[in-house]
């Protein structure tokens, strides 16, 4: 099954995503490497995912307001922390969609937000309003597809983000009212609190059945999802 995902994605996309950097809360320049006398041996390979996080932190992964893509009772849950203004998140969207297509009954994707860039908080308001209108997925797809039109990290054009959402089917007049109500404010507050508690420092960040993805890249994500699906299938036997 994993092989079929790779075929659909294509080698170019896999390579491109592997070399693409994530968006981080603080993007400090990497200091120059210190000279060494000898080349050290390569490090031992690390697992693609870590151990499951504590029950207390697991409880923070999914909130009542979190958009869920896929069946609610799916045995495998992928939680993705994304920033709608993050180029890496937009680039990973096809990978996430392919996982949904390959495992339509076995995987659900839960979306969480991290506002790491200027304008991201307004885009999150747009997306939360879209969720409340049942338009979350098409609006998210549209914001990612047209990201270059609104998500400049120096001068974001949030008015254009609203226009894009409207073109994707959002009732903008209604959404702009709900985007400023107490429920929307609570969503932004909880998202900000949870990324701190869960130590989310970059986007996208993935948790698969409560296990944080350690190795950044599409193949590690696919590997962990495939592993968890296999476990679920074995448990049903």
Image: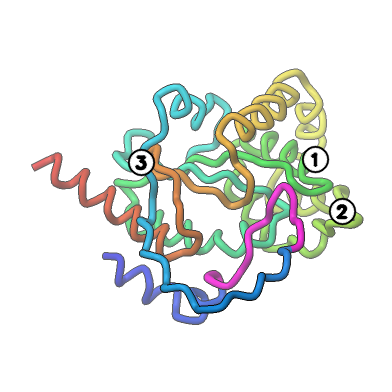
Q: Residue at x 58, y 28 (%)?
A: 65
User: x, y percentage for residue 40?
Assistant: 47, 73
Q: What is the C-alpha distance between the residues marked 1 and 2?
A: 10 Å
Q: Nearer the viewer, residue 61 or 69?
A: 61
What residue is pinned by disc 3? 51
User: x, y percentage for residue 8?
Assistant: 40, 73
Tell me if label 1 and label 2 are in contact, CB under 8 Å: yes
Which quadrant of the figure contains the C terminus?
top left
Q: What is the C-alpha distance between the residues marked 3 and 1?
A: 34 Å
Which quadrant of the figure contains the N terminus?
bottom left
Q: Is residue 103 shown left or right of residue 156?
A: left
Q: Residue furthest top?
A: 182
Q: Element under label 3?
A: loop
Q: Residues within 10 Å of mark 1 (few under 14, many from 20)?
A: some
Q: Residues within 10 Å of mark 2 (few under 14, many from 20)?
A: some
Number of the front mark, 3 or 1: 3
Going from the N terminus, do you reach mark 3 or mark 2 first?
3
Q: Residues within 10 Å of mark 3 (few under 14, many from 20)?
A: few
**Which contiguous range is marked in magenta?**
17-29
Q: Is residue 108 visible?
A: no
Q: Residue at x 82, y 35 (%)?
A: 173
What residue is pinned by disc 1? 122
Corner quadrant of residue 17: bottom right
Note whether 41 is above or below 149 in the view shown: below
User: x, y percentage for residue 156?
Assistant: 87, 53
Note whether 10 is above or below 192 in the view shown: below
Q: What is the C-alpha distance between the residues marked 3 and 2?
A: 38 Å
């Amino acid at each position: 099954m994993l092989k079929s995902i790779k075929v659909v994605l294509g080698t170019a996309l896999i390579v491109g995503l592997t070399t693409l950097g994530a968006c981080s809360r603080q993007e400090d320049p990497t200091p120059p490497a210190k000279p060494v006398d000898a080349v050290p041996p390569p490090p031992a390979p690390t697992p693609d995912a870590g151990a499951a996080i504590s029950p207390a932190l697991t409880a923070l992964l999914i909130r009542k307001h979190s958009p869920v893509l896929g069946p609610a009772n799916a045995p495998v849950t992928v939680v993705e922390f994304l920033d709608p203004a993050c180029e890496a998140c937009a680039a990973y969207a096809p990978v996430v969609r392919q996982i949904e297509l390959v495992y339509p009954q076995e995987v659900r994707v839960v979306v969480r937000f991290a506002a790491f860039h200027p304008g991201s908080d307004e885009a999150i308001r747009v997306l939360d309003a879209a969720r409340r209108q049942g338009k979350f997925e098409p609006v998210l797809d549209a914001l990612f597809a047209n990201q270059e039109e609104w998500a400049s990290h120096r001068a974001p054009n949030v008015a254009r983000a609203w226009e894009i959402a409207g073109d994707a089917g959002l009732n903008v007049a209604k959404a702009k009212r709900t985007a400023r109500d107490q429920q929307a404010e609570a969503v932004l507050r909880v998202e900000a609190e949870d990324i701190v508690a869960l130590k989310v420092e970059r986007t996208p960040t993935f948790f698969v059945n409560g296990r944080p993805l350690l190795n950044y890249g599409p193949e590690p994500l696919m590997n962990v999802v495939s592993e968890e699906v296999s476990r679920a299938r074995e448990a049903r036997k």
